[in-house]
Image (tube, rainbow, N blue to C red):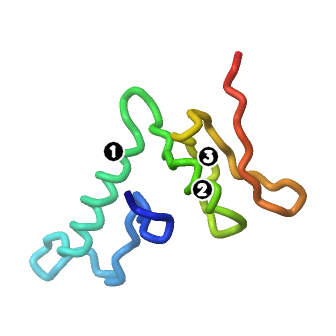
Amino acid sequence: MATNSEQKSLIPDLPRNPQIIDSNGMLRTEWNLFFDQLILGLQTIFSPEGFKMPQQPAANIASLMGNQSVAVILYDSTNDVFKANKLVGSTPTWVEINTTP
């Protein structure tokens, strides 16, 4: 499994070449790859049944401290709970989301 420093975004970066179409009117290779990766990423997190929550083991979530984490909601696969990254005062903190009715 990838560690925090090795994780990649599901949404790819935009290609640096602003020209989308080549001289033959075809989609440029780097843009074709971008759209392929984008669609695959979106299909990975969205399904007909609903949103698939990104998950991490508790050890990884604990290491996502401060502003280094862009995640807002994660599924803690170790403790079987959802967690949200919210500001407590001025400190980003992981808190458990209560899902009981």
> Residue 39 at x, y = what percent?
31, 52
| First-in-chain label (2 vs 1) | 1
The N terminus lies in which quarter of the figure?
bottom left
Cα separation, mark 3 vs mark 1, equals 19 Å
Cα separation, mark 2 vs mark 1, equals 19 Å
> Amino acid under label 2?
Ala
Label 3 CA crowd tier, 10 Å (few <14, some 14–19, many 20+): some
User: Which secondary structure, mark 1?
Assistant: helix
User: CB of mark 2 within 8 Å of CB of mark 3?
Assistant: yes
Cα separation, mark 2 vs mark 3, equals 6 Å
User: CB of mark 2 within 8 Å of CB of mark 1?
Assistant: no
Q: Nearer the viewer, residue 49 or 59?
A: 59
Q: Report the residue at 24% width, 75% height from top.
A: 30
Tell me the residue that label 1 is attached to.
Answer: 43
The C terminus lies in which quarter of the figure?
top right
**Horizontally, is 28 left or right of 14 in the view?**
left
> Amino acid under label 1?
Gln
Tell me the residue that label 3 is attached to.
Answer: 73
Determine whether 80 is above or below 72 in the image.
Answer: above
Determine whether 94 is above or below 30 in the image.
Answer: above
